[in-house]
Image: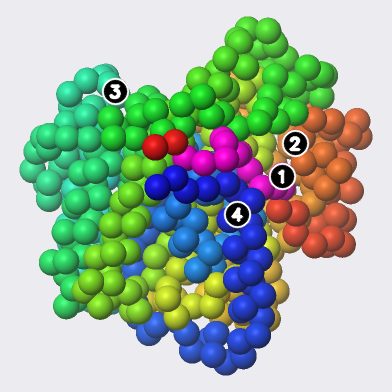
Amino acid sequence: MKRTLGSAALVSSLAAAATLACGRPESQIRDAIPDKPNIIVIYTDDQRWDTLGQMPAVSRLASEGVSFANSFVTSPVCGPSRAGLLTGKLASSLGITLNEGAEGEFDPSATIAVELSRQGYVTALIGKYLNGYRRRFPQVPPGWSEWRVFRDHYVDLLGPGSVYRDPVFSWNGRSDTQKGYSTELLSAFATDFVTRNADRRFFLLVSFWAPHVPLRPSERHRGEFAGRAPPKPPSLGESALDDKPEWLRSRVGSLDLDAVWESQWPNYLELLLGVDDAVAALRTRLEELGLAENTVIVFTSDNGFMFGEHWHIGKALPYEESIRVPLIVWNPELPPRRVDEMVLNIDIAPTLAELAGTHIDADGMSLVPLLRGDPVRWRQSFEIEGREEFGIPDSYTATRTESAKTIEWGDGSREHYDLREDPYELNASPDGGREQGREEGTEHGPEPGPEPGPEPGPERAR
């Protein structure tokens, strides 16, 4: 049976859920969060915020849970962002200066896993850890009861022993090759962990490689989005780059970005279908075991991805396509609704700590008050950190408010965008918006960005 999976349907369901939640007393909302629940974090790699409408199980999670419309990462590359999720701290606070090699700069003794282990949780990391882990493979960091983690070997990303095909794992400190497609393997490992620990309080972080390059979906999903790229945004192959750094201007005309867009999006979305199947399998298992009501699921990603917007393919830049990620928090007792406050990847660790009845020292803020609907003073701006060592030609510091963004590059150049008038960041103001950016963050409500996101076609092919 064919299903309509458009983003517009997801937005409609979220609006309906928000309406229902508004009618529920705040005291019931507060009481809905389980005491010291089981926690599952489902973590994708390079997933943009505007792709959920093409994932039916995750769309259901969003429509039945708390969906954060303005979720960002503070360093939009894998290593620093993952370290931020584990600790709740900025890359600069952690002393992380690298993407490839972040694991070597990371202190694993102060993670959320260590703290939850102290609180009696059985903990597991399944999938990807930090970039550069292969240098310490197959060691197991502190805090993890179970460890089934990719070697993270980049020499061959396509053949046997790669992160997608027949991956090599550290299996609790022992090297072990598992035959099969990695997304499906991680799904099986995750449901097995939940089954074996049904009578214990657990924390599970299942960290998929998908939809990271190479864009090689499983045979089961290959072709389901064939010929179905989303509409091209105005920022794709942006023609007027006078307001962008010189190194971006130098790329104009270097690639056929229309061809990149049309050929890569279908593969990217098909990779996400494998993750979607894993989400469905985990929910089914939780319900079968009677664990759903006492389990909180968090779904998010380490950064976004650009398919030629502003002439960039990849991530690491401070533009919206790179820094915005999905974030959903689900529990069947938690009233479904949309939250518009700006939230960050570094908020997740303190959130998990508070759910577990403890605390972790963090730069981020616990999301629990937002989940409960408590009145709370929330951030009106945040900083984005980028370094040349993250794989880009110049460093930057950016400030993102609720309606504006100012980027200061290492070469001294500056860009300022009014995101209400210019959500695709096409026209930077000539004065750099030094004062305007600070004012806008306090005078306007949240800016959710371009809506509703990529729409590859009226229905998923079967």
Q: Secondary structure at mark 4?
A: helix
Asked if residue 332 is among those painted magenta in the image, a careful observer would answer no
Q: Quadrant of the C terminus?
A: top left
Secondary structure mostly seen in magenta is: loop
* Mark 1 residue crowding within 10 angstroms, few (<14) / some (14–19) / many (20+): some
Q: In this rendering, would 220 be left or right of 338? A: left
Which residue position holds label 3?
157
Q: In this rendering, would 12 be left or right of 349? A: right
Which residue position holds label 4?
9
> Which badge, 1 or 3, is on the more N-terminal residue?
3
Q: Secondary structure at mark 2?
A: loop
Give the Cα distance between marks 1 and 2: 7 Å
Amino acid at circle 3: Leu
> Which badge, 2 or 4, is on the more N-terminal residue?
4
Task: State the residue at coordinates (85%, 55%).
Answer: 440
Above or below, 296 relative to 191: below
- The numbered mark at residue 450 is 1
Locate residue 158, reporting x and y percent: 27, 21
Give the Cα distance between marks 2 and 3: 32 Å
> Which badge, 4 or 1, is on the more N-terminal residue?
4
Q: In this rendering, would 56 be left or right of 292? A: right
Q: Could you tell me if the residues under marks 1 and 2 are in contact, i.e. CB atoms within 8 Å?
A: yes
Which one is closest to the eye, mark 1 or mark 2?
A: 1
Which one is closest to the eye, mark 3 or mark 4?
A: 4
- The numbered mark at residue 424 is 2
> Which badge, 1 or 2, is on the more N-terminal residue?
2
Q: Could you tell me if the residues under marks 2 and 4 are in contact, i.e. CB atoms within 8 Å?
A: no
Amino acid at circle 4: Ala
Give the Cα distance between marks 1 and 3: 33 Å
Task: State the residue at coordinates (89%, 34%).
Answer: 429
Locate residue 117, reporting x and y percent: 25, 69
